[in-house]
Amino acid sequence: MSTHPFAYDRQRFRDTRRGRGQATCGGIGGGATLLVLALASLANPLSAQSGTVTGTLTSGETGEPLSNVQVSIQGSGLGSVSNNQGRFLILEVPTGEHELVAQLIGFREERATVSVSAGESALVELSMYPQAVELEGMVVTGTAIAAQKREVGNSISLVTSDELLYAGAINLEDALRGRALGVSVTGSSGTAGAGSDILLRGTNSVNGRNRPLIYVDGVRMPAGTFEDATGESQEHATFLGSIREEDIDRIEIIKGPAASSLYGTDASAGVIQIFTKKGAPGAPRWTMNVQQAVQRIGHVGPDIDPTGLRVNDCTRQFNHSLEEGYHFNRDEAGALMSDPGCPPSGTWLRDAHVQDYSMSVRGGSQEVTYFASGAYGITEGVIDPNESEDVNVRANFTFSGFENFQINLNNFYTRRDITWIPNGDNAEGLLFNVARGDQGETPDNDDSAVFDLTQDQVINHFNTSANIDWTPMDNMRHRLTFGLDYSNSHFVTQRPWLFWNNPRGTRTVDIENRRVITLDYASTYLHELTSDFTSTTSIGAQYNQNEHLGNRTDVEGFIGPGAKVLENAEDVTNYNEDRSATEGGGFFLQEQIGWRNRLFVNVGLRADTHSSFGREYTRDVRFTMYPKAQATYTVSDHDFWPSWWETFRLRGAYGESGEAPPASGSVTVFEASSLADENNLGFIIQNLANLSLGPERAEEYEGGFDASLFQGILALNGTYYKRRTFDGLIYVAPAPSNGVAESIPQNVGIWDSEGIEVGVDFLVFEGFTSRVSINANYQYNQTTMVDLGDPQFEQFTFNYLNRYRPDRPIPSLYGKKICNGDEMGALPTYTDDDNCILNGVEIQNHPDTFFYAPSRPPHEASVGVRATLFNNFILDVFGVAQMGHWLYDDMAQELAADGLWPVCWPINNAVKAGIEAEDPSLYSQYTAREIGQCWENESDNEDWMEPADYFRLQSASLSYRVPQEWLRGGVTGATVQLRATNLFTFTNFSGLYPDALIRPAQQTARGNGYILPPARQFSVNLRLNF
Amino acid sequence: MNKTTKKGSSLLRLLAVGAVLATVGCVDTQITGVIIEDDIEDPNLMVPFVRGINSELHDNMRDFSGVWWFAGSATDDFNNDGTSSSGEEILEYRNYSDRPGNFPWAQLHEAAWAGYYGVHVTNRVFAEEAASHPLIARSWIISGWAERMLGELFCESIYNYGPDAGALMGPNDQYDPSQIVQTDSIMRRSVNAMQNALAVAEAAVASGAPTPDGDSRIFDPLKLMYAAHGGIAQAAMLMGDWDLAVQHAAQVPDDFILYSHADPEVEDNGWFDVSFQNDDFTLWNTPVHRVFHDDPRVPWVKCGEWRSDTLRTTHTRSARDIIDTGRCDFAAGYGGEFRAESNRMPLYSSLKSETEGLLTRPDGETGEDADFPMVRGTEMLLIRAEKALMDGNLSQFANLVNQGRAVYGMDPIETPATAGALEYPNALDDGWSILDGERYTLMHLEGRRFADMRRWQHPYITEAHAINPRVEAENGAARLAFCMPIADIECDANGDITCPGVGS
């Protein structure tokens, strides 16, 4: 139960003043220290009546040693803290039986009986397990500096390093899929180097970034994707792809304005904060990881096609005729015909090799601790030559040798070399051409020619931060963070001389540099109002700068073969230089009143300004204000609360935050013009400023609970939220009578969001050194357009039939409707025809498009089972599901329209024969909907919108911790893990894969087609500690 | 307690530091490579600034969908068979099924706005010199021409800025977007702008103000003064104030001409492109072909000939029906590939852009270099001639017409026996017919014919050619309508006006 309201807080501050470590038994050369202490105990006369207790504390889930565990002998006042190798030592323990208690925030308290003999050392080995609901742990994100979870009124999702260890993810975005409530990860692909998109609580913005703020150790980094100017691969590398899961200590996620008010502008889409691993006092502890894996893609396309659209098997040409049914094409000699250009292996796919090697070390003294890591990996894509080669280096230092200061320095550098392949809905792409067979674009249908187009991207990403903690008094703490994130992408797309689609050859060099500077100060002052009431006053000020330097050059016309550079070309066809920078900043004031460490009420206000705000954005004197109010009440701390229901906390939060407008929206910009006054340059208005332009603002209410019952056997948490985005940024084309008709961003949109998040942890079994638990998450997120601005914005239209319309979820699919879908043997009619009767109502040439369904999944769920068996085996199985949305299947539609979609062949052939013979009986066994989908040249986009629900067995792993007694040669821990990723997907979606999206980072339009499904990955991992 | 107070003071100090750190003025947006509004308050930038303003107007002459194209397609300036997408647009507004004209509507509003904005900025930058600075006169003139062209093409406009809406406002000031006005008001705005221009130009001449940038073609104060006189005359005539029109027309020398100068390096000349590149625009069967084929003001070339007279009546122009005369240089890239694609060719194309002389650039450049006359002394003579005709003074009419023809070295006409009336086709047998022909040939392909036909209720306007009957019905007249309706782009974006269907 709870402690005195001040007890924890003051301890928290004192920890900082002294540095993280207390009286540990470690330090540099911790083993030697133990020895000295042991010898000292022998020299002590009292030792004849006492002994020592020593041992190791490990995570029951991962087997990793746990540092900073408080270990004590019950009722004796004796205790110690474990070092970075999980070891502890308690001296001068009186002889006899004692109860040893181990406590670590975030973990369930463990107890063990220990028998101490005079002059001897008793050995204890304890495994600790995470607590299902724990309220004492500290969280940082969304708070002034840090706060106990019990003080925070908003929901916050945590992903720990343990979870990442078992996620078996292809990348960090994938690791978050289903692991954290409120997080939606969309876009899955078998392309090496490609990332996915992350949304928190569904759609947040129409024209804004729609992506959460990303912080790494307190420093902002860009969200989203690096640019790919030519877009030939139609997939992107993401900034998050620069961070290795192995370096992450934990990820904190706050999901909306109710929690993100203190971040102000840019935070309405939530905040993801990544904390990387830090050092701990003790001898150097090395960890080495080696991973070897193979990636493989299963059957591509409809099951009925044994060649997998000729991608899996290009040695045969699958076909259909009414006479022969499905068959393989044969030449005049009767031999099977293969696809021109088919690789010698007979398939366009390969078993791709994934190799990853990493080494990390953590340790240090009471004054300085460190964590350093280095990694090298090569991930081959399933289509040669797709590949991503990654190098990561990290060095984190903590300096605690000052009286009241602690300084953290965190740094990483990542280099990624990615070789992409042309793909997607692209006439030069591989799937586009292979699936089309002899109707492709490649010369003589030799689809290997697509690889003549090369795309090479080099990414350099550097991030550094310094956190200074100053605790001048027990009840006052200051924190200053300064950091820099710098990234560079060098993307070259080249069509060589005599390239089939442009014989002159082309080259595009797209260089993109981004720099983000963060300066963040916060201070907290704790004050005891009465014995029951506390006051915590916090203030803070932040500044950030985003700079973008882009340079793209397109050239054309090479003479001769070989590698080229820009100056080898005859013509410069396009060049573009983009240099822009924005700044933002603000400050906040927050007051929290606590009552008996049970009830906390928190109000705050952030004042924010941003260089993108208009000059006449006078509301709040060019500052915008974001208020917040929260309350949380741990009811279970009362004595009347039943003991079987050990934890129950209610929480509620209200808050506002915003999204910065585009940089050029508030500035009248002129551009050079040569169109008048011959041979004399002039300049004309490019866009007119909206001087009143302000941030897109959102307010959010949320309420929820956290509960733990039956001694942690069952843990529940639930949250309901409701959010309204107002002053939504819409690009409005003003009436020309205003003088300038170019669209300018205006704060006129309104949309509402609503959702539920529910998490359940159930401890199924515990005993006999084994433990089985189930975790399940469900979330519902839906955003509905209320107002797009008056009057011209009745809707927005994007690619792949996505539109934004009032009173409908956004984005949603719209199109004409088929009128007689279930009618057998009838040709389809549509609402834009002149003879449509839909549901009994006659419709003549209806010009409008109809709502089909949201194209983002409103329902998402995940379920995981983790079993620790006999202490040494850990089985982890995890599945995710997305439901309730539809997608437009661009690939199936296009191929059906060209008579190339295998499922459609019997229908198409029958209809064509029936039409030609004027005999409808030839296709009487098919419905009008089937005919609409499959009738060559008549297949419409709307015919291929369909539900995209799926469940995926995302990962399964079996880990084996090698028993300590088997370890040799300084190895202190060893784990072997067999892991499988993306094993099975259950779906009725007829496209390639329901989550393989065209341009997954494209926020406004979701479409499916020509993107490789995610690969199955089978890996063997070996992790050694020494 | 004291301790708490002290800490409270510390907190306030920290708060102040935070406030300063993030306060207004500390943040800035940098977009390198563009000129932002704050940068242009510089006298050295005013010349390119005013040159840029003209490019907004210039677009309407050079662009494929500019005023000249809409006016020319709707009239007998050239034949547009509607087989291209742009042609469809013309057919649509003849069928009253759509509201075309987005480009000229938007571009003319922008040009007028840019001119007023130019006055606004140059007045501020030049301060005491403003009253006599040629650049300010030039800005006024651009606004005036834009207003005039707007009124020539559209019967209605939306007054959302500018002098008639009160004091000249800045670019971001709010105006009443619900005020719909008719042609007369639009022309009054044009006259207003030109009168302002005239005052400044006259002051510049009187004070001996230097020609900005040494560009005497455009910024010579004397030329600006003549242009302002001409601009007043052009607009005053269209608003029916003939006394004002004649008064100012008389101030312009006969051989005066001011161009909007094209840059062949960076722009496409719509005249040139349309004449030579597209198969569906032609001078065939226009007055140029039928009546004025020897008039030097409307030069043309025969690109193809019908293989037989039988084919001629079909109006089809497939390659098998036509003999290529080899005079249109299709192989140069223009027209050649289009003809290969569509197997068609224009039968007659205008050479107005390729003939040296007063109608083209003074330096004699041809082809895509063609400049666009904005005001001429010879046009002023025709304004005065029209007034004489209205007054029944036929000899003065003939004298003024001949004064203009002499500029082009053409034979004089005889004084017509009667004022007569317009007819179509034109028999050139009376005063009005002669005037019709003179204005047609003088300003052929310059977008001026449309307004003439409307104000004259020209016999060319039949049911097949009428446009936007709604406006005429409202006026209660039995005349056939000949107005472009308010463009879709305005109807869609301006919530303060109602745009009924153009056919209703």
Image (cartoon, coloured by chain):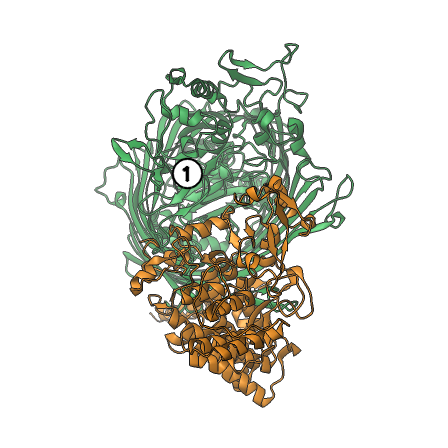
Chain colours: A green, B orange
Task: Give residue A276's position: percent from left, percent from top.
Answer: 53, 45
Q: Is residue B94 left or right of residue A38?
A: left
Residue A564 visible (yes or no): yes
Q: Amino acid at mark 1?
A: Phe
Q: Quadrant of the N terminus of chain A?
A: top left
Instruction: Please state which of residues A737 and B415 is positioned toward the viewer in this rendering.
Output: B415
Q: Mark 1 highlights which residue?
A: A107
Task: Give residue B16's position: percent from left, percent from top.
Answer: 43, 70
* Figure check: A357 above or below A909: below
Q: Looking at the image, how many numbered discs can be counted on the residues?
A: 1
Badge 1 element: loop
Q: Chain of mark 1?
A: A
Q: Quadrant of the C terminus of chain A?
A: top right
Task: Give residue A971's position: percent from left, percent from top.
Answer: 61, 31
Residue A122 visible (yes or no): no
Residue at the right extreme, as displayed: A560
Task: Give residue A970's position: percent from left, percent from top.
Answer: 63, 32
Category of crowding for the residue at label 1, using alpha-carbon neighbours closer than 10 angstroms: few (below 14), some (14–19), many (at least 20): some
* Figure check: A429 above or below A25: above
Q: Is residue A397 left or right of residue B195?
A: right
Residue at the front extreme, as displayed: B417
Instruction: Please state which of residues B123 and A167 is positioned toward the viewer in this rendering.
Output: B123
